Image (tube, grey):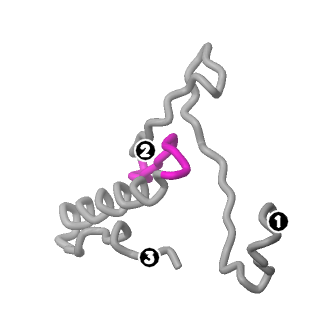
Amino acid sequence: YMFPSVNVTDEDIESTWAGIRPLIYEEGKDPSEISRKDEIWEGKSGLLTIAGGKLTGYRHMAQDIVDLVSKRLKKDYGLTFSPCNTKGLAIS
C-alpha cells in the first residue's frame, strides 16, 4: 500500500485486474516499436479474432467485435440486436 494514510484495507478493494497486450508481430521490430493499433481478422471458418490495441482501449475493442458479430448475425440469419452499450456502463 503506497499511501498508508488513506487507510485502505483488503475489504475496501472491489476488484483487480492485470493484462497482457497481444501485440501483432512485425518482423524486425522489438515490442516497444510495434503499433498499438488493434486489428480484426476473419478466418476461413468464420472465427473472428482481434489482437493488438492498448489495455486502456479494451472496452472499445470489445464494442467493435460485438458490433461486427451483430452485423454478421443480421446479414446471415436476419437476427437484430441493439448496438453494444459498453461505453455507457459503469465497470463497478
Q: Using the image, tell me which numbered label, if any, was put on residue 43.
A: 2
Relative to 38, does residue 16 appear above or below in the rendering? Answer: below
x 69%, y 69%: residue: 16
Q: Disc 3 marks which amino acid? A: Ala
Give the mark nearest the N terminus, 1 or 2.
1
x 34%, y 72%: residue: 88
Relative to 45, does residue 14 appear above or below in the rendering? Answer: below
Kindly identify which residue carries mark 3: 90
Drawn side of residue 91 relative to residue 44, left or right:
right
x 32%, y 61%: residue: 69
Give the mark nearest the N terminus, 3 or 2.
2
Kindly identify which residue carries mark 1: 1
Q: Residue furthest front?
A: 5
Give the mark nearest the N terminus, 1 or 3.
1
Relative to 52, does residue 13 appear above or below in the rendering? Answer: below
Q: Using the image, tell me which numbered label, if any, was put on residue 12.
A: none
x 37%, y 57%: residue: 65
